């Protein structure tokens, strides 16, 4: 018993054991049909709006990277590209491999159909929407649906959602943050690493 100390009430109980804490589910850990419907609908609208846009800006260079990967998966930078008004090795226009290999797989599976390749980008839109929704449910509950819609169709995302790697990179970063937050809540050191 502590007398005359700064405690003005009962001493709080000890933190539950890790086994007990893992059973507590954060609301963001589960996603209901309505929330999933909003994410899926927003991702579909984003993907369809992208599919009707022409190939622009740096898209051709990423399509060339994907074509090289589709033809020679173990030599992703073996081709030559016309960049910066000159021919040179594809390595001079470096592209991280994950999204490029995904696009190359789409080229192999879907054939030479640009519209279908753009629809092949739907998983990136879904990853972005689900990750954003997870983070919003955790730190700004109640606004998930409108913010997912506003973000996915915003001027920051819609014009840049094409064959360039900006939106897939953002989707992977948000997914990593969401998974890290979930692991921390579950006291999962392995999940956080």
Image (cartoon, rainbow, N blue to C red):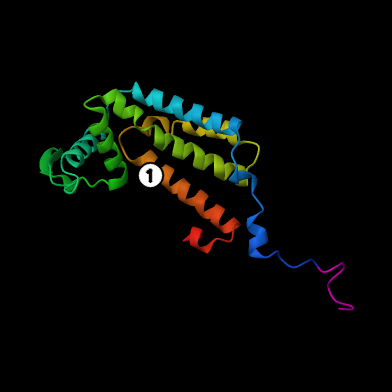
Using residue 54 as the reference point, say whether residue 70 is left or right of it. Answer: left
Q: Tell me what residue is drawn at x 22 percent, y 38 percent.
A: 66
**Label 1 Cα neighbours within 10 Å, binned few <14 / some 14-19 / many ≥20:** some
> In the figure, 85 relative to 53: above or below?
below
> In the figure, 113 relative to 102: above or below?
above
Using residue 16 as the reference point, say whether residue 116 is left or right of it. Answer: left
Horizontal and vertical percent for residue 9?
87, 67
Horizontal and vertical percent for residue 156?
43, 35
Horizontal and vertical percent for residue 55?
27, 27
Q: Tell me what residue is drawn at x 55 percent, y 60 percent.
A: 188
Q: Secondary structure at mark 1?
A: helix
Q: Is residue 28 magenta?
A: no
Q: Residue furthest top?
A: 52
Q: Which region is colored magenta?
A: 1-11
Query: Residue 49 falls in which quadrant of the image?
Result: top left
Using residue 92 as the reference point, say whether residue 110 is left or right of it. Answer: right
Q: Tell me what residue is drawn at x 53 percent, y 30 percent.
A: 149
Q: Tell me what residue is drawn at x 52 percent, y 32 percent.
A: 39
What residue did someone put label 1 on? 169
Residue 57 visible in the displayed image: no
Quadrant where the image shows the N terminus: bottom right
Q: What is the chief secondary structure element of the magenta stretch?
A: loop
Q: Is residue 6 magenta?
A: yes
Residue 75 visible in the displayed image: yes
Using residue 184 as the reference point, say whether residue 109 is left or right of it. Answer: left
């Amino acid at each position: 018993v502590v007398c005359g100390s700064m405690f003005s009430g009962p001493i709080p109980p000890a933190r539950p054991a890790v086994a007990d804490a893992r059973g507590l589910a954060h609301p963001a850990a589960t996603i209901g049909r309505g929330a999933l419907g909003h994410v899926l609908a927003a991702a579909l609208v984003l993907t369809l709006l992208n599919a009707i846009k022409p190939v622009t800006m740096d898209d051709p260079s990423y399509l060339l990277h994907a074509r090289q990967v589709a033809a020679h998966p173990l030599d992703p930078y073996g081709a030559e590209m016309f960049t910066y008004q000159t021919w040179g090795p594809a390595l001079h226009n470096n592209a991280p491999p994950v999204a490029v290999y995904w696009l190359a797989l789409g080229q192999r599976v879907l054939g030479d159909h640009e519209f279908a390749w753009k629809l092949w980008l739907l998983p990136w839109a879904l990853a972005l929407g689900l990750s954003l929704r997870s983070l919003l449910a955790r730190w700004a509950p109640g606004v998930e649906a409108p913010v997912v819609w506003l973000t996915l169709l915003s001027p920051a995302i819609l014009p840049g959602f094409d064959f360039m790697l900006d939106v897939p990179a953002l989707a992977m970063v948000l997914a990593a943050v969401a998974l890290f937050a979930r692991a921390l809540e579950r006291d999962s050191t392995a999940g956080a690493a």
